[in-house]
């Protein structure tokens, strides 16, 4: 669970009234057309994502449904670059002042694309080769022992 979540008390056990209400909601859910189900999920998610349970919900989503590499273009989050982020990246205040919100949005999208397309696959190959090398060393030491 994310560190930010430690202070949120979630109910330890589900109460019987909740189970009954949940069953009723699920039955009504099944009657909704697909488009209405999607719209309702988005409304509920928006409510959760704008409240204090956001970190818990995001953590639960990633644990329940890990992102697959072929889903990165859809699943990798879009992010915003704030002036403070640029200052933290060691740009001086004069340079930061020249960058409009549209420029910062362009920077964020370029960074996102770089992470998705340029960084992941070479790093995956590198780490896989490291693991294979370790496996080879382990296999060689196993042969030396026998």
Image (tube, rainbow, N blue to C red):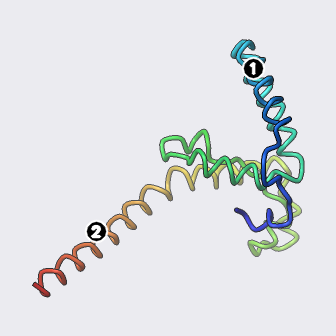
At 49% from the left and 47% from the top, the residue drawn is 69
Secondary structure found at label 1: helix
Task: Tell me the quarter of the image containing the N terminus.
Answer: bottom right
Q: Quadrant of residue 24?
A: top right
Q: Residues within 10 Å of mark 1 (few under 14, many from 20)?
A: some
Say which residue label 1 marks: 29
Of the image marks 1 and 2, the number of the one nearer the N terminus: 1
Q: Position of residue 28 (x, y in %)?
A: 78, 17
Front-lying residue, 48 or 6: 6
Pair 1/2: label in front:
1
- Count of picture labels: 2
In this rendering, position of residue 123 left or right of residue 137 = right
Task: Tell me the quarter of the image containing the C terminus.
Answer: bottom left
* Spatial separation of the CA atoms under disc 1 and disc 2: 48 Å
Q: Residues within 10 Å of mark 2 (few under 14, many from 20)?
A: few
Q: Quadrant of residue 73?
A: top right
At 64% from the left and 51% from the top, the residue drawn is 110
Q: Residue furthest front?
A: 16
Secondary structure found at label 2: helix
Q: Residue furthest bottom?
A: 145
Q: Residue furthest left?
A: 146
Front-lying residue, 74 or 21: 21
Q: Position of residue 11 (x, y in %)?
A: 83, 52
Say which residue label 2 marks: 132
At 89% from the left and 48% from the top, the residue drawn is 51
Q: Position of residue 58 (x, y in %)?
A: 72, 50
In this rendering, position of residue 121 left or right of residue 20 = left
Q: Are marks 1 and 2 in contact (CB under 8 Å)?
A: no
Front-lying residue, 57 or 75: 57
At 83% from the left and 42% from the top, the residue drawn is 15
């Amino acid at each position: 669970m994310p560190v930010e979540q430690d202070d949120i008390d979630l109910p330890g056990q589900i109460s019987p009234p909740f189970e009954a209400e949940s069953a009723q909601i699920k039955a009504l859910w099944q009657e909704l057309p697909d488009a209405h189900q999607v719209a309702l999920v988005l409304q509920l998610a928006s409510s959760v994502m704008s409240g204090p349970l956001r970190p818990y919900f995001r953590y639960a989503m990633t644990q329940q449904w890990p992102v697959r590499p072929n889903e990165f273009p859809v699943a990798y989050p879009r992010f915003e670059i704030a002036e403070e982020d640029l200052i933290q990246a060691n740009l001086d205040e004069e340079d930061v002042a020249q960058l409009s919100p549209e420029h910062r949005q362009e920077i964020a999208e370029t960074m996102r694309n770089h992470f998705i397309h340029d960084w992941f696959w070479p790093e995956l190959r590198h780490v896989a080769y490291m693991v294979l090398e370790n496996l080879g060393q382990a296999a060689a030491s196993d042969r030396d022992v026998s």
